[in-house]
Image (tube, coloured by chain):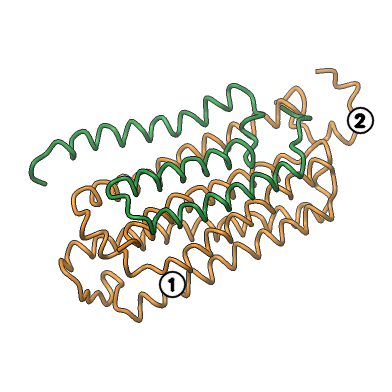
Amino acid sequence: MTGHTISRNRYFLIFAALIVLLVLTIFMAYVDLGPFNVIVAITIAIIKATLVILYFMHVRYSSRVTWVFVSAGFFWLLIMFTLTMSDIATRFTF
Amino acid sequence: MDNEQLTHETRSFVAHQFDDLEQQKEAGTLGMWAFLATEILFFGGMFMAYLVYRFSYPQVFAAASQYMDVVLGGVNTGVLLVSSLTMALAVHAAQEGNRKQIITFLIITMIFGAIFLVIKGVEYHHKFVEHLVPGYNFQYEGAEPGKSEIYFILYFVMTGFHALHLIIGIVVLTVIAIMTARGRFTKEYYTPVEISGLYWHFIDIVWIFLYPLLYLIHVHK
């Protein structure tokens, strides 16, 4: 927890990865993958968000209880998406 | 734990309900993450609405998203990523107790935040000129103007709330920079710098999802 500092180079490395992923997501958007375009876009966005959370936000080096708090937010988001879409996606009319 | 070993200066940073600085820092971090969890669900509600309407009217959303400026949006994503890097470097400087560097990196972070807002303002201006602002002057040339308006409502509400968060973030960082200049933080105590950073990175994360979802729906033709 405290005392664990990430080296400055690590931050620059993560930043470089984020920029590469940004360029990749723009590049992939110009390639016609049909329904997979949105899946690729979301996957890249999740990877970018994960990098920010783990390194810029130090969650990788945080306590277990911090992990629980972080996961809880996204877990509840997932519940909302899953339950709502299981309704919307199975309707014939909207 | 062993308060006797702490210097007088360090002890003065520990509020009386905490045993030591580490416990206090842990509580501060957890509190911020509890707040951020509510923020995830706040933006989550808007993403939920987006998901429902994009699922229902995929072609309409694809056509309406053609009006977005992919270049300006992409530049803005880069601008926010840079600001996140400099924010992380500000926290790093705080860990090293380098007061001057904290302030420098905080100012750079705020400047990049402001650049984002200016570019966003230019984009908003384009939408006003093109008559694409729902409830104000919405005149859509393409097919299904009614359903397309939903896309633009989502665009303005989501990016608007994101921009509002960024403005609040700049205000928070200004306060932190002033506190740093007044010598309120040390190598041992810099929790406010750290948790303001968490807030800033959260704003970055929201945009990481907004950019592909609003701008990059249908750029391939």
- Of all residues, the one furthest to the bottom in this rendering is B129
How many residues crowd mark 2 within 10 Å: few (<14), some (14–19), many (20+)? few
Chain in green, by letter, is: A
Q: Residue at x 74, y 37 (%)?
A: A6
Q: Quadrant of residue B108?
A: bottom right
Residue type, numbered disc 1: Glu
Of residues B60 and A59, the one nearer the viewer is: B60
Q: Quadrant of the N terminus of chain A?
A: top right
> What's the mark number on residue B219?
none
> What's the mark number on residue B7?
2
Q: Colour of chain B?
A: orange
Left/right of residue B130 with respect to residue B77 in the rendered view: left
Residue B39 in view: no
- Tally of marks: 2
Q: Chain of mark 2?
A: B
Q: Residue at x 57, y 38 (%)?
A: A53
Q: Residue at x 35, y 43 (%)?
A: A39
> What's the mark number on residue B123?
1
Q: Secondary structure at mark 1?
A: helix
Q: Quadrant of residue B60?
A: bottom left
- Of all residues, the one furthest to the left in this rendering is A93
Q: Residue at x 69, y 56 (%)?
A: B175
* Relative height, residue A30 to residue B42 (above, below): below
Residue type, numbered disc 2: Thr
